[in-house]
Image (cartoon, rainbow, N blue to C red):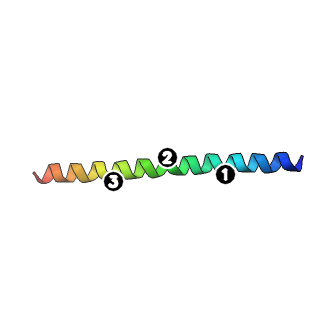
């Protein structure tokens, strides 16, 4: 039973890291998108 709890905790940490990776990708993409929009507006 104790080992089962440890496995569940590992799974939760894995899903959290996956969400962080997805958030990081979205933030980077939006930063690039805003940068391109600003350069287009300057033109």
**Residue closest to the eye, 16 or 6:** 6
**Relative side of 37 to 14, left or right:** left
**Relative side of 17 to 11, left or right:** left
- Disc on the earlier residue, 1 or 3: 1
Tag of residue 13: 1
Question: Of helix, strand and loop, which one carries label 1?
Answer: helix
Q: Residue at x 35, y 49 (%)?
A: 30
In the picture of the structure, the residue carrying the numbered disc 3 is: 31
Numbered disc in front, either 1 or 3: 1
| Residue 3 picture location, percent across and down | 85, 49
In the picture of the structure, the residue carrying the numbered disc 2 is: 22
Q: Residue at x 30, y 51 (%)?
A: 32
- Would you call the spot at circle 1 few (<14 residues within 10 Å), some (14-19), or many (20 or more)? few
| Residue 12 picture location, percent across and down | 69, 47
Mark 2 near mark 1, Cβ–Cβ under 8 Å? no
| Residue 24 picture location, percent across and down | 46, 52
């Amino acid at each position: 039973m104790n080992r089962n709890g440890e496995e569940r905790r590992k799974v939760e940490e894995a899903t959290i890291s996956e969400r962080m990776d997805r958030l990081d990708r979205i933030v980077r993409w939006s930063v690039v998108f805003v940068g391109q929009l600003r350069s287009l507006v300057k033109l």
